[in-house]
Image (cartoon, rainbow, N blue to C red):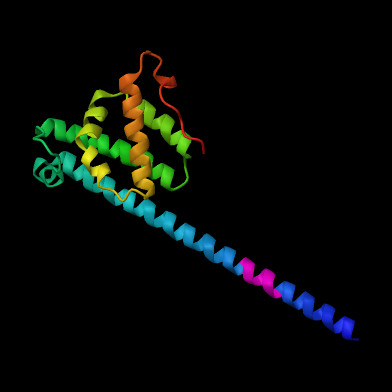
Amino acid sequence: MATKSYGVRALAAAVTTGAGTAAESLASLATRRRRRAALIEQHRAHLTLLCKAMDDPALAAVLDTYEETIPPDQQRQFLYANALYTNALHFHRIGAMNRRELYGHLRVICRNPIVRAYLAATRHHRASLDGSSDEAELGRMVEQLLQDQEEAETDEWWVVGEPPCD
């Protein structure tokens, strides 16, 4: 009888532990989904604000945080470059592309001289990030990619740089 009672208690403990683990997993999944939804909404709002600034020079002036004077037409181009760049980062953040895929995408857009000028003009923005943050790490990846492209002695742009291991 004692053995039977022990077996029932052990089974009950295992079921309780399993139920707790399942509940914890569901809570974690719900948290990840809420975070992903919040990131998507934040990105949508960011793009809306950028579009308004691209359409209205008076609003674009609010986003002028460059260390040098940028002419209005170039600032509109920079705002668009920012939209391209942050869109790529957003897709990475929500899990739609891994770091290696992000690198490949950035490798393509960084070939454009306007995007490179934008990234050079905003270098101080990336340098001000908390060095341990994911965004700062991605910023360092972009800086290295820009340096690799600058130093490349080949026209084969698709082989420039070392993609990260994911």
Q: Please state the horizontal and vertical placement of residue 116, each as a whole percent of the image.
A: 26, 28
Q: Given the current orientation, which residue lies at the most extreme right position?
A: 1
Instruction: In the rendered view, tell whether residue 13 sits above or below residue 22.
Output: below
* Residue 20, placed above or below residue 44: below
Q: Is residue 15 left or right of residue 45?
A: right
Q: Is residue 60 magenta?
A: no
Q: Residue at x 32, y 53 (%)?
A: 42
Residue situated furthest bottom in the rendering: 1
Residue at 28% across / 39% down in the picture? 83
Residue 16 horizontal side relative to residue 158, left or right: right
Instruction: Choose top left, top right, bottom left or bottom right for residue 63.
Output: top left
For the question of whether residue 40 can be seen, the reply is: yes
Q: Residue at x 13, y 31 (%)?
A: 73
In this view of the protein, which residue sits in the foreground, 126 or 46? 126
Magenta residue span: 16-22
Q: Residue 33 location, x and y as percent?
A: 48, 58
Which residue occupies the foreground of this view, 56 or 156? 156
Visible in this render: residue 110?
no
Please state the total of marks drawn on the protein image: 0
Would you say the magenta stretch is mainly helix, strand or loop? helix
- Against 98, is 146 above or below? above
Residue at 48% from the left image edge and 40% from the top image edge: 98
Q: Quadrant of the N terminus?
A: bottom right
Residue 71: x, y in percent?
9, 32
139 left or right of 57 in image: right
Q: Quadrant of residue 34?
A: bottom left
In the rendered image, residue 157, in percent from the top left (x then y), is placed at 39, 19
